[in-house]
Image (cartoon, rainbow, N blue to C red):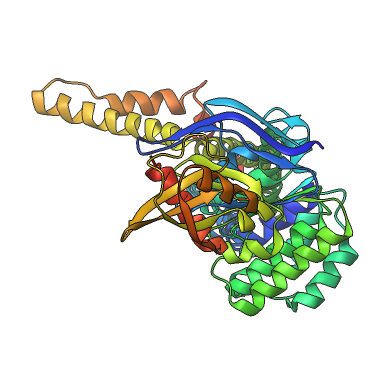
Amino acid sequence: MTNAIETRDLAYRAGKDFEIRSLSLNVREGSIYGFLGPNGSGKTTTIRLLLGMLRSRGGTIEVLGRGVPGAMPAILAQTGYVPERPHLYPYLSVAEAIRYHAAFYPTFDPSYAAELRRSFNIPTDRKLSALSKGEMGKLHVLLVLAQKPRLLVLDEPTDGLDPVVRRDVLSALLDFCSQGEATVFISSHLVHELERICDWVGVLDDGKLVAELPMQDFKNGIKRVRLAHAPAAAIGSPFVVLNREPAGTEQVWVVRGWEPQMAEWFGAAGAGVKEIVDLDLEEGFVELLRSSRTPAS
Amino acid sequence: MYRQVLHAQWLALRLPVVLLAVLAFAVPLLTVTYGGSLEGAPTGRVAEWLFAAQQIGVLIPGLALLLGLLLGIGVWAHDHAGKHVYALSLPVSRERYVWLHFTAGAALLLVPVVALGIGALIAVFSVTLPSGIHAYPLQLTARFLLASLICYSIFFAISISTKRAALAILGIICGILLADLVLSVVGVSGSVTPTVFMWLTNWPGPLSILIGRWALFDV
């Protein structure tokens, strides 16, 4: 399977305090890839690097099989981008903004745009400066979906939107994805939102990719294990230890890549498994971040 | 695509463009009314009238400068406000996007130029000129077009430049003023500002077109 987005050892520095280090992403074609990370972790910067808006200091980027930034206009012709904050011209009306956007994309489908506009209930004659935040968010999504892109890049598209609008936007995205083979790259710090729609997850923290794995593995593979007589180290374990903490006479380990038969490894190491608890996505996300900041011994 | 960019620029800038068009239309008409009536005027009175008309003509290069400034800055104002994120996400090369904006702004510039041309023609047809005095409505309009276009290009280039380049330009201006201040404090005769001004406004200086007589009527 080919990748819609592929970066190798991507490096970027902004000022003295922030840098992206050796970032290697693999976003499979046709997947819905959730790009998770806390605020300020570098999600927007990474997206801007992918779309040629910023120039990297090192590494390579390929989007839709073409090199960035060399093939930018061709890549952008097949890419729909919803930025973190809307940047459309505020003096245009909705109808004018749609016509303006359509002029740049030969694949733009005006009838689909009209259909989405009706379902999103956005008034055509209203100026963009008079739209609510939710209407503006929906308009952005409308514009990129009507482009019929091969790749959708969404930077926190539902941030700050009320639950009703958020549901409208996400269901429109899912409808679009179910119609074709588009790849979706969606960044968010709202873990639960991505849980429902993504099939792959990348976790970024402080400019570093902490994990990249199928959503199923992320959901089912991170466990909290309560152990009696825990071994001093996890040398040779078939899973990754994210965290370990004492709990009275016992220890609680948080592990990644867990499968049921792995309990035998503890038995062989002389430990007793008292309890295995499934972590929800948010807890797993927090543990991943914690382990990347202070790796378990 | 160009039509949409032009339409968007028109919507953003129509107010200053229309205001400047009204002014550009009015200035040539003011030229013929400012000096009073010419009917049966003696030679001395004609010379006064011509002098008054040429005084009004000074407004035209000022208008060209203002038009160039407002359009040069205005065509990028909303892109600057959005940090160019939307522009950079569009599937056109940066060079082409700049060219689209430049030509759209230049097209809007034609509105006041045409208004000045019409005003000049009406002014010329509304007055009976004594022998020896000639009208130059088309030449004046062409010069206004060229002057506006040059000013527009300069401000467009400054407006699109990076922050660093804009700071460099500002630094040079401050440096010139500071040099003058230092020269005056230490009592050295001479000044940098007039030299720079002369360099800019004398041929082949970029602003030389603004200097000289802007006369709708001349001998």
B131 sits to left or right of A289: right
Q: Quadrant of the N terminus of chain A?
A: top right
- Side of B55 relative to B148 (left or right): left
For the C terminus of chain A, the quadrant is top left
Q: Is residue B132 visible?
A: no
Residue with the most extreme left position: B186
Q: Image height check: is A85 above or below A130?
A: above
User: Looking at the image, which is closer to me, A138 or A193?
Assistant: A193
Residue at image point 71% right, 74% down: A168
Q: Residue at x 49, y 61 (%)?
A: A283
Q: Residue at x 40, y 32 (%)?
A: B169
Q: Is residue B145 above or below residue A136?
A: above
Q: Observer-nearest residue: A54 or A25? A: A25
Image check: A116 left or right of A207? Answer: right
Q: Position of residue B156 (x, y in %)?
A: 56, 40
How many numbered tags mark residues here? 0
Residue B194, position as x, y percentages in the image:
32, 28
At a point 55% along the width and 35% down the height, the residue shown is B157
- Residue B12: % across, % down: 62, 59
Residue B30 can be seen in this image:
yes
Residue A34's x, y, as percent?
64, 53
Front in this rendered view, residue A204 or A293: A293
Q: Nearer the viewer, residue B216 or A165?
A: A165
When the figure is inspected, residue A276 is found, relative to residue A60, above or below; the finding is: below
